[in-house]
Image (cartoon, grey):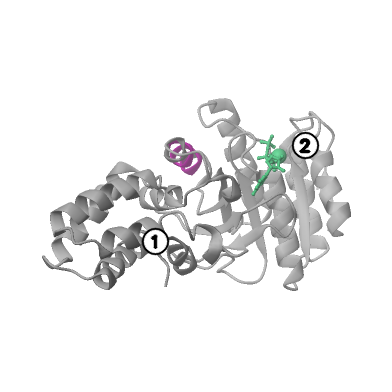
Amino acid sequence: MALKELFKTALRTKLNALFTSAKNKEEVLGELEELLILADISLPAVEAIITNIGKKAKSVSSKESYNELLRQELLAVFSGTRRSPLANGGKNVILLVGVNGSGKTTSAAKLAHYYQHRGHSVLLAAADTFRAAGASQLSLWGQKLNIPVVSGDRGADPGSVVFNSLQSWQSKNFDLLIIDTAGRMQNKDNLMKELAKIIKIIRKVAVDQPAETWLVLDASSGQNAQVQAEKFKEFSGINGMVLAKLDGTAKGGTIISIAARLKLPVFFTGNGETENDLWEFSENDFVESLLGQ
Ligand SMILES: Nc1nc2c(ncn2[C@@H]2O[C@H](COP(=O)(O)OP(=O)(O)OP(=O)(O)O)[C@@H](O)[C@H]2O)c(=O)[nH]1
Ligand SMILES: [Mg+2]
């Protein structure tokens, strides 16, 4: 399955029925608002979408024109945030951050596999020295995927693991260093400061890195996503997102809400637990999955 197919049946059928009904514009907009809210799109985002469609729709509109107006509104949510990951080319450090259990370690492995497959030489760093299984989980992935992993003992300073990995990345001339960090709740200031320290260490060794700091977000985290993103932005300057566990969300609307609120590019989605369950995010495919051709 691809992103295009993911939400195919959920919203589409209902929209079709609504847009082909003999209802007037007000009724259509009222019901559309309900459908979008039921699809997990947050109220502010839905209100903005409905207001804009209300302004643009003629009093008697066809199914095609409603569909097109909705498509434009959904795509507009993503405009202004789009950029390519690893835009600075050459060598990159990707730092993965996020709350406990969001999918960081799995995403680190998936990303390493993804880029290795595309010809990049990749080094992984297990900077989660907090959890007993933190380093071993990533090392197992490394073995499976044949990707080297720098790790430290449990309780070791994550900064030292990061430092060692950077030295290896530079001396062995890897293209990409992907750093997995320990899960931290955004309201734990000491842990958030540890993240700021990790970034300081990276900058000291490689002044223009980390070029990419991505928040790994559980796609079902709903309203809490904004709070998480704001705090992680403050302490680590996140500049992109990976939406993990998209396979566990029945409706795609949460992506619209997150993009509308956070104004951060979504680069990848996680859709399962294996290394291949990573999709590049495309807003066109995503909107197509919601609305159909
Ligand atoms: N279905 C599904 N499961 C996922 C996905 N990504 C991660 N998981 C699972 O979610 C659980 C947590 O994933 P981890 O990658 O360990 O999460 P983490 O953020 O590293 O967790 P901490 O290091 O404890 O903060 C594991 O059981 C993963 O297999 C995904 O995209 N889809
Ligand atoms: Mg982890």
Depicted 264 relative to depicted 129: above or below: below
> In the visual, does 39 lie left or right of 6?
left
Dot placed on the residue nearer the N-terminal end, 1 or 2? 1
Residue occupying the point 71% across, 45% down: 105
Report helix, strand or loop for mark 2: helix
Residue occupying the point 69% across, 58% down: 111
Q: Main secondary structure of the magenta part?
A: helix
Residue 228 painted magenta: yes
Which of the 4 image quarters holds residue 151?
Answer: top right
> Magenta stretch?
227-234
Which residue is at the front of the view, 271 or 158? 271
Depicted 240 relative to depicted 219: above or below: below
Indicate the position of residue 108 as horizontal and vertical percent values.
70, 51
Indicate the position of residue 243 as horizontal and vertical percent values.
55, 50
Nearer the camera: disc 1 or disc 2: 1
Quadrant in the picture for the N terminus = bottom right
> In the visual, does 184 lie left or right of 258?
right
How crowded is the residue under tag 2: few (<14 C-alpha within 10 Å), some, or many (20+)? many
Residue at the far front: name it.
22
- State which image quarter holds ligand 2: top right
Residue type highlighted by circle 1: Phe
Residue 109 painted magenta: no
Which residue is at the front of the view, 191 or 13? 13
Provide the residue designation for mark 1. 78
Residue occupying the point 35% across, 43% down: 42
Residue type highlighted by circle 2: Gly
Indicate the position of residue 207 as horizontal and vertical percent values.
61, 57
Provide the residue designation for mark 2. 134
> In the visual, does 173 lie left or right of 202?
right
